[in-house]
Image: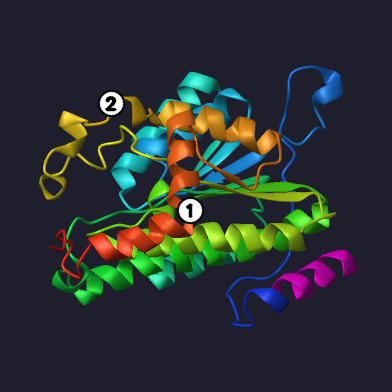
Amino acid sequence: MPQLATAGRRVRGFLSDAPIPGKHVIATRPLAANGDAMRSARRKTALVTGATGGIGSAFADRLARDGFDLVLTDRVASSLEEAAASLEQAHGVQVQRWRADLVDPADVHGLVGRIRSGTVPDMLVNVAGFGTNQPFEENDLEVHLRMIQVHISACVSLTWAALPGMIARGSGDIINIGSLASFLPVNRDVNYAATKSYVVAFSEQLQPHLRGTGVHVLAVCPGLTRTGFHDTREFGGLGETRPFERMWSTPEDVADRSLRALRRKKVIYTPGVINTLVRWVGSSHIVRWLGRRVFTVRGRASS
């Protein structure tokens, strides 16, 4: 398969030369469809990480309603089974369950091997992530390293795994979930904003390289979203009080708007008019300079 070999060399040249387990053979599995004329057609498949809750769950449901078969990943097997069974029953699609904890590099390499050995999705949606609400130096180092592993290493690894097959096929979409926080000065969860900034920059730099291949990359940067992310004690019940109510989105709204942005070939997208304005204001050098002046290293307003 000379076309695939060329695509693989092309991707390895700008992402990584590290060996990844799994034979690099791309195969597609034709699925039956209604009507004799459609029986040989291959139904599209989407791989969604962090798929059992919040934005990941909303993407999985939206894509299933659009007729995609799914590959779902999550670290909790029971939640994964429950989500997959519900989608199969509701939408009549096929759902593969890939239990994996993206904090664990071995699990990520296992996913990479499965993708490179045949399960190349038509769409990859990198959603999995987590945040904290403590000053940088007060968090355990291990927490920061786990966040880098999930937000950056797993995202890059799965993108690297999927791209050769997508390029060889001449089509594919990758959605990477960033955050509005990546454009704003933050005073507490510094590593969250920084790792999400990488996700945005990675997507933006990757897209021009893929021009003409039929593969498109979109970085989605949601603002406050009703996912349970902010409901924990660590965030002081922010998800329950919901200040700035007009800035909050639902996961379903984020997924729907993001897929429309993908169809419009956006590269960086922030759902919601107010959030978009915040992003543009926050991106200005003046606002970033003010943020550095206002916040001290411990996240308290300076005098």
- In the rendered image, residue 290 lying in the magenta stretch gets the answer no
**Residue 133 x %, y %:** 19, 55
Viewport quadrant of the N terminus:
bottom right
Pick whichever, 4 or 127, lies toward us. 127
Question: Total label count?
Answer: 2
**Residue 282 x %, y %:** 43, 50
Q: What residue span does the magenta drawing correspond to?
A: 1-12
Pick whichever, 209 or 215, lies toward us. 209
Residue at 14 percent across and 70 percent down: it is: 138
| Residue 252 quadrant | top left
Amino acid under label 2?
Glu
Q: Is residue 99 visible?
A: no
Residue at 74 percent across and 18 percent down: it is: 34
Q: Badge 2: few (under 14), some or many (20 or more) residues near its Cα, within 10 Å?
A: few
**Residue 47 x %, y %:** 55, 46
Looking at the rendered structure, the secondary structure element under dot 2 is helix
Looking at the rendered structure, the secondary structure element under dot 1 is loop
Could you tell me what secondary structure mostly forms the magenta stretch? helix
Q: Is residue 183 above or below residue 40?
A: below
- Number of the label disc, if any, that sits on residue 245: 2
Q: Is residue 279 visible?
A: yes
Pick whichever, 112 or 136, lies toward us. 136
**Residue 161 x %, y %:** 62, 64
Mark 1 highlights which residue?
283
Looking at the picture, the colour scheme in use is rainbow
